């Protein structure tokens, strides 16, 4: 088994240069923001200036809320951020209830995906209340768990790294369209990985994935992975929108009943206006895992620094 694990790790290192299209796209977007010498025509259009912060929102009385953005298999960054949150908790009034809301996307793209889940289900919460939301990447894992044919799609946006973390090497199916025999071989290879994954996925992990919530409300805040569809009541929002929505939510100007705290859409910095707080800072590639601290009417942020 140890030899197999070493072979899988070696194979992955050899294929690191072949990251998924979504990873490449994110890398390009973030690089455009940091390249000082890019011309206006080469860079993406800058977002409209954030509106002046005039809205006052509040956490529940006596409770401090910490919301953590997309982790994507970076257990190392999660450890560091949790340490910062523990230190910050010491500054709060005695008796304050402390809750950490995890916004989803714990896995994929990072090789420590399995160990992130091990951490989240462990007893290392040290007195924190916890809320775990589902991200679109956890939804993808569950879809693969029930449907072997989804594996080829899942690995295109980071599922391969999760499979590696559980001890499986995704089949190389690039040549599967060259012949009927190649297609059958690829299907057989995926069936074998799927069967092994289902057999060896720890029961506690499966229960964790299946237990994830689509949203959480506390005080004046609504926590959700991706966002919500404008002009649709919360009880009529679809799970797909809450896990996947982007432009329709991000570009709308109207304020919601709650301030929306979300991840899902990576940016080079935390975003905040009167409508929403965006906490996905591309941790798996930037080294910056971000969290919001919501206490009373105060809003502040914690994050890891790139090493």
Image (tube, grey):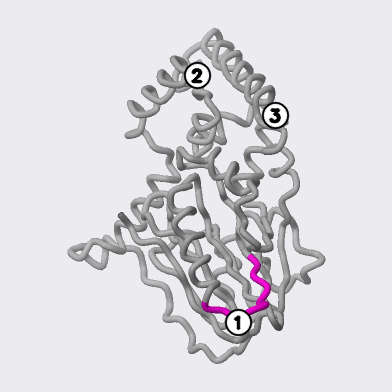
* Image coordinates for residue 105, horizontal then vertical, percent: 57, 50
* Image coordinates for residue 176, horizontal then vertical, percent: 50, 17
Q: As drawn, is 195 to the left or to the right of 73?
A: right
* Image coordinates for residue 142, horizontal then vertical, percent: 68, 38
Residue at left offset 46%, top offset 21%: 5
Secondary structure at numbered mark 1 = loop
In depth, the one of 93 and 111 nearer the eye is 93
Which residue bears the numbered disc 1? Answer: 93
Residue at left offset 59%, top offset 20%: 193
Q: Nearer the viewer, mark 3 or mark 2?
A: 3
Q: Residue furthest front?
A: 94
Question: Relative to residue 89, is residue 14 depicted above or below?
Answer: above
Residue at left offset 68%, top offset 63%: 129
Q: Nearer the viewer, mark 3 or mark 1?
A: 1
Q: Quadrant of the C terminus?
A: bottom left
> Is residue 97 highlighted in magenta?
yes
Secondary structure at numbered mark 2 = loop
Q: Residue furthest top?
A: 181
In depth, the one of 150 and 82 nearer the eye is 82
Q: What range is drawn magenta here?
A: 91-99
Question: Relative to residue 11, is residue 300 depicted above or below?
Answer: below
Res 223 quadrant in image: bottom right
Q: Residues within 10 Å of mark 1 (few under 14, many from 20)?
A: few
Q: Which mark is residue 177?
A: 2
Res 219 quadrant in image: bottom right
Decide which of tag 3 and tag 2 comes sooner along the chain: 3
* Image coordinates for residue 238, horizontal then vertical, percent: 75, 58
Which residue bears the numbered disc 3? Answer: 147
Number of marks present in the image shown: 3
């Amino acid at each position: 088994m140890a030899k197999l694990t070493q072979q899988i790790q070696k194979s992955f290192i050899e294929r690191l240069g072949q990251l998924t299209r979504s990873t490449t796209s994110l890398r390009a977007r973030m690089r455009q923001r940091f390249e000082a010498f890019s011309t206006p025509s080469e860079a993406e259009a800058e977002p409209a200036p954030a509106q002046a912060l005039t809205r006052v929102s509040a956490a529940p009385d006596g409770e401090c809320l910490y919301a953590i953005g997309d982790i994507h298999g970076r257990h190392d960054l999660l450890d560091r951020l949790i340490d910062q949150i523990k230190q910050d908790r010491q500054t709060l009034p005695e008796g304050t209830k402390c809750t950490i809301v995890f916004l989803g996307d714990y896995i994929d793209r990072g090789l420590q995906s399995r160990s992130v889940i091990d951490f989240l289900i462990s007893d290392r919460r040290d007195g924190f209340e916890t809320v775990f939301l589902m991200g679109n990447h956890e939804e993808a894992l569950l879809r693969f768990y029930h449907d072997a044919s989804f594996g080829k799609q899942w690995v295109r946006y980071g599922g391969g790294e999760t499979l590696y973390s559980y001890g499986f090497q995704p089949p190389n199916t690039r040549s599967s369209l060259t012949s009927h025999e190649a297609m059958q071989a690829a299907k057989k290879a995926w069936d074998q990985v799927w069967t092994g994954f289902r057999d060896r996925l720890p029961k506690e992990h499966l229960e964790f994935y299946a237990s994830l919530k689509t949203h959480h409300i506390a005080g004046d805040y609504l926590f959700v992975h991706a966002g919500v569809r404008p002009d649709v009541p919360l009880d009529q929002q679809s799970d797909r929108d809450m896990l996947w929505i982007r432009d329709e939510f991000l570009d709308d100007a109207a304020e919601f009943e709650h301030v929306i705290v979300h991840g899902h859409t990576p940016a080079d910095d935390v975003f905040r206006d009167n409508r929403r707080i965006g906490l996905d800072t591309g941790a798996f590639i930037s080294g910056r895992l971000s969290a919001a601290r919501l206490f009373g009417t105060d809003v502040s942020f914690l994050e890891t620094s790139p090493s």
